[in-house]
Amino acid sequence: MIGNKNIYILNFRSLSVLFTIIRNSKTKNKQYIFAADRLMNILTEEALASLVSNKSLVKTPCGIYAGFLQDYSILIIISLNIKNF
């Protein structure tokens, strides 16, 4: 986390691998599409995981489960700063 408490920098090795595949001029179209799709999935998963969650009790067939419900009313913006990758 830098400067602003609402900014998170994802520093995963898997992201570096995906960016390398995407930026390589010799990457085949099929590989490029796979890497781009995977990158978008990772970014989306991380964005959804960072949403505010509220404790919630859910009734299940096995009893009460204490879990979390996410607040989807919050706006999330994903920005790729290509120079830093």
Image: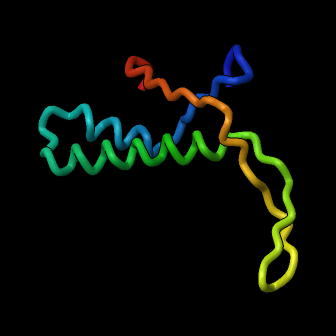
Q: Residue furthest bottom?
A: 62
26 or 67, nearer to the observer: 67
Q: Is residue 68 left or right of residue 16?
A: right
Quarter occupied by the C terminus: top left
Q: From the viewer's perspective, is residue 81 above or below residue 45?
A: above
Q: Residue at x 72, y 48 (%)?
A: 70
Q: Position of residue 2 (x, y in %)?
A: 67, 19
In depth, the one of 73 and 47 nearer the eye is: 73
- Residue 38 percent across, percent down from the top left: 37, 49
> Who's the residue at 54% across and 27% down the image?
77
24 displayed left or right of 35: left
Quadrant housing residue 62: bottom right
Q: Is residue 84 above or below residue 51?
A: above
User: In this figure, what is the number of numbered marks?
Assistant: 0
Question: In the displayed structure, would residue 40 be above or below residue 9?
Answer: below
Name the colour scheme. Answer: rainbow
Q: Position of residue 67 (x, y in %)?
A: 80, 62
Q: Is residue 21 rendered to the left or right of residue 2?
A: left
Q: Residue at (71%, 16%) from the top-left corner?
A: 4
Identify the residue at horizontal 34%, vertical 36% (top origin): 19
Specify the quadrant of the image occupied by residue 25. top left
Quadrant where the N terminus sits is top right
Q: Residue furthest top?
A: 3
Position of 6 relative to 56 (above/below): above
- Residue 80, percent from left and from top: 44, 25
